[in-house]
Amino acid sequence: MSIEIKNISHSYSKGTIQALKDVSLSIKPGERFGIIGPDGAGKTSLFRILTTLLLADNGSAVVCGYDVVKDYKAIRSICGYMPGKFSLYYDLSIQENLNFFARVFGTSFEANRHLVEEIYVQLEPFKDRPAGKLSGGMKQKLALCCALIHEPKVLFLDEPTTGVDPVSRREFWDMLDRLKSRNITILVSTPYMDEASRCDRIALMQDGKILAVDSLEGIIANYDKKLWSVKTQHTNAVLKKLKIHPEVASSIPFGDSIHIRMKNQLATFEDVRITMANMDDSLTVAPLVPEIEDVFMDLMSAQ
Amino acid sequence: MNNNEHIIEVQDLTRTFGAFTAVDHITFHVNKGEIFGFLGANGAGKTTAMKMLSGLLLPTSGKASVAGFDVFTQTEKIKKSIGYMSQKFSLYDDLSVLENIEFFGGIYGLKKQDLHIAKDLLLSKLGMEDQARSLVSSLPLGWKQKLSFSIAMIHKPVLIFLDEPTGGVDPITRRQFWEMIYDAAQEGTTIFVTTHYMDEAEYCDRVSIMVDGKIAALDKPANLKEQFEAESMDEVFYKLARGAKRGDG
């Protein structure tokens, strides 16, 4: 295993805030592992423990065979870490930041340039510009380069795409795709559920707990509740009716449709269609393959 | 610019910073009572446009009125007529829930009696009576966001600007938040909202997408999907913003 986390718990403010509750996870070498959960789920605390920046109250963790407490120095030299907040030097240029991070890790930018070449070529035209004057997308690219420049075995990316628009989010994941051949283990966290499809495996996290761990396909396949998609021109009005409908167990808006679950799990398409038509004959109903958000919300409510 | 049905009326609105044109001759309107989605890639000019419409930044040229007031000459009147909330700046962390309500109520000039009524109503609506004396910093993000939305509405504005109100919020709370938006719209408040969640774009009556300082598209979500031959708003956004030349500053 590349990362082995056993029964980690952590609290803040004299135990009043439980950030992590008995978290265990195993992450394989070369795996791209996503930790998916909203703000406050405990993602950053977990990252800080694994990167030896925070001591857990309980439990243990091993990164590439090194214990996060005893062997913290060894871990620091083999990890790349991109924190959620942009943490490079604003008043150093792109090039100076890269040189600095390479040297801190006992190497040089020139020696390891090949590791970041594909991303660096996009930064190179602006290499003398101070990091503080870069656009959000460029800052992100530079931060990734700085985290990669010492050839880490494990890369920790804490919410690299938060607050980023959908196009730039996609570009960031494409950038990670290009690292795949390099066999770096990547642990990445995100609040965006749709990014699950870009990971080999994911852990769904909420309120300090891991709700599920599997591949995206595995998580969807494991979800045994039947869902239906209802489409309407008047989502809000229809939602209000669905919420009080005696045969409907749950109704959740999903963009231009509403995902519903019937109390009777054995209801056929025809049953559901008739029930909905009786409520409002302008609705269209279709069977539905659950999305990751369906599963997440279901697991959340079960807590 | 006297259309009473248009709560926001914008014509050729432009803002430059030195040689850089952040907002480049945008023209559009927002209807009274509508939920208007204001989308765009990072750096497309959304924030600059919103600052001008909320009276915080003077435009370089063009015309615009918000709630009947001119963005060049009546910015103080605009500020009194609108509500504003964002993920980044919302409430004072080191004040309690109640203190925040009282503070913002006071800022917006609510009378003591009105504030008293508004306070109780707000707390009971949110189910936060037990948290009234807790510091805002101790609340989960989702609660904070619902609270700051309610506080931004405390002076019953005709129009509210929501700048990425649901960023990082869990999927259940995110939907509860949209229920609050719907309810406010139903009561007649116009909603002007930005988001990076494309499913939320579907909840808007109309959506505009900014690319490189210009409005590249504006219509109902269903029409935009048809126009761009896309299955989802995500795809519409991708098709439009992919060609953007600039990132955010």
Image (spheres, rainbow, N blue to C red):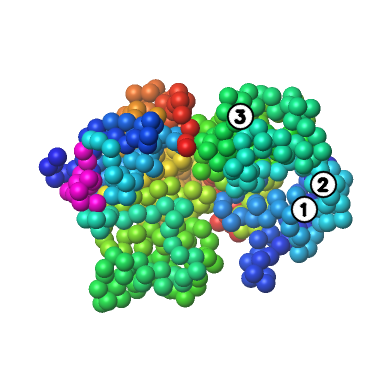
The label shown at residue A127 is 3
Q: Give the residue type at disc 2.
A: Ile
Distance of mark 3 from mark 2, alpha carbons? 30 Å
Give the crowd class for mark 1: few <14, some 14-19, many >=20 residues within 10 Å.
many
Q: Give the residue type at disc 1.
A: Thr
Q: Give the residue type at disc 3.
A: Lys
Which circle's residue, 3 or 1, is located before the other in the chain?
Answer: 1
For residue A200, side relative to residue B202 (left or right): right
Say which element carries label 3: loop
Find residue B34 and report its image quarter: top left
Say which element carries label 2: helix
Residue identified by numbered label 2: A75
* Residue visible at 43% across and 47% down in the picture: B164
* Labels 3, 2: front one: 3
Which circle's residue, 3 or 2, is located before the other in the chain?
Answer: 2
- For disc 1, the chain is A
On the rendered image, what quadrant is the N terminus of chain A found in? top right
- On the image, the x and y values in percent for residue A89 come to 63, 44
* Residue visible at 47% across and 61% down in the picture: B143
Say which element carries label 1: loop
- On the image, the x and y values in percent for residue A232 come to 34, 39
The range drawn in magenta is B63-75
Find residue A78 and report its image quarter: top right
Q: In the picture shown, does residue B197 fall above or below A249?
A: above
- On the image, the x and y values in percent for residue A207 come to 61, 58
Q: Is residue A221 visible?
A: no
Residue identified by numbered label 1: A52
* Residue visible at 74% across and 54% down in the picture: A53
